[in-house]
Image: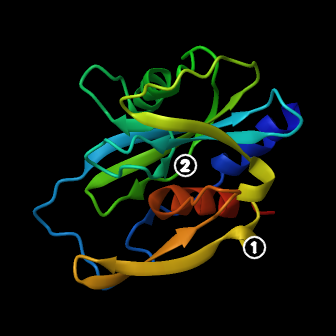
Amino acid sequence: MADLAASLRAALARPGAPSSDFDLNPAVERPDTVKLREAGVLIAVTLDGAEPRVLLTKRSSGLQHHPGQIAFPGGKVEPTDADVTAAALREAREEVGLPETLPEIVGLMPSHETVTGFRVTPVVAVVREPFTIMPDPSEVDEVFLTPLSHLLDPANYMIESRRWRGMRRKYFIVPWGPYYIWGATARMLRALAAQMAP
């Protein structure tokens, strides 16, 4: 497990390219008038089980934005947050009950720009100790853990498409069991897989 933390740290120290929802959709352009809002998400790799797993949430079906989608804990940077890491840790505590003292930050990934106007920085951490998952029902319908090995295998990623705002939009998916992981979450995981590749 110590080797995994070291491997993640070494991989994230290497230069990486920013990603975006526009990677597969060059015809879609962000309006110049849109000012990107900073956000942080926590890619928490738990090390307390038989194998390393990544914590993911299924967003509440009652939310206005992205209801029912699979996401990392995280959100926009608030004025009280020191930086994107602080925002990601705060949101993880609020959304799933992860104590802010448990994650060991191993590095930051290059930012991901969403079509909804956010510049998201993925904060990668290992969580060595078990904790009691306590989803906030106003934000999270479900919390689940996905094997890191599945998410790091490029062969598990596919590209699908659907119509969005009058045009067909492509996006990554990385299904696991009953969960349909897609969009920005899948794109950031695909970037992590590329960063971890030998």
Q: Nearer the viewer, residue 33 or 181?
A: 181
Identity of the residue drawn at 86% across and 40% down? 51
As drawn, the label of residue 109 is 2
Q: Nearer the viewer, residue 197 or 48?
A: 48
**Three-letter code for the amino acid on which mark 1 is drawn:** Ala
Q: Position of residue 66 (x, y in %)?
A: 35, 52
Residue 126 placement: quadrant: top right
Relative to 179, is 108 above or below?
above
Classify the position of the C terminus by image quarter: bottom right
Identity of the residue drawn at 81% across and 26% down? 48
As drawn, the label of residue 155 is 1
Q: Secondary structure at mark 1?
A: helix
Left or right of 34? Residue 189 is: right
Q: Nearer the viewer, residue 52 or 61?
A: 61
For the residue carrying disc 2, how many other residues have a C-alpha within 10 Å: few (<14), some (14-19), or many (20+)? many
Relative to 189, is 103 above or below?
above
Q: Position of residue 189 (x, y in %)?
A: 60, 56
Q: Position of residue 62 (x, y in %)?
A: 31, 41
Identity of the residue drawn at 47% across and 37% down? 141
Residue 193 placement: quadrant: bottom right
Residue 43 placement: quadrant: top right
Asked whether residue 25 is in view, the answer is no
Question: Do residues under tags 2 and 1 come within 8 Å of each other at their CB atoms?
Answer: no
Q: Secondary structure at mark 2?
A: loop
Left or right of 58? Residue 30 is: left
For the residue carrying disc 1, how many other residues have a C-alpha within 10 Å: few (<14), some (14-19), or many (20+)? few
Left or right of 142? Residue 177 is: right
Task: Tell me the CA gap for discs 2 and 1.
Answer: 21 Å
**Three-letter code for the amino acid on which mark 2 is drawn:** Met
Q: Position of residue 79 (x, y in %)?
A: 24, 24
Of the image marks 2 and 1, the number of the one nearer the N terminus: 2
As drawn, the label of residue 122 is none
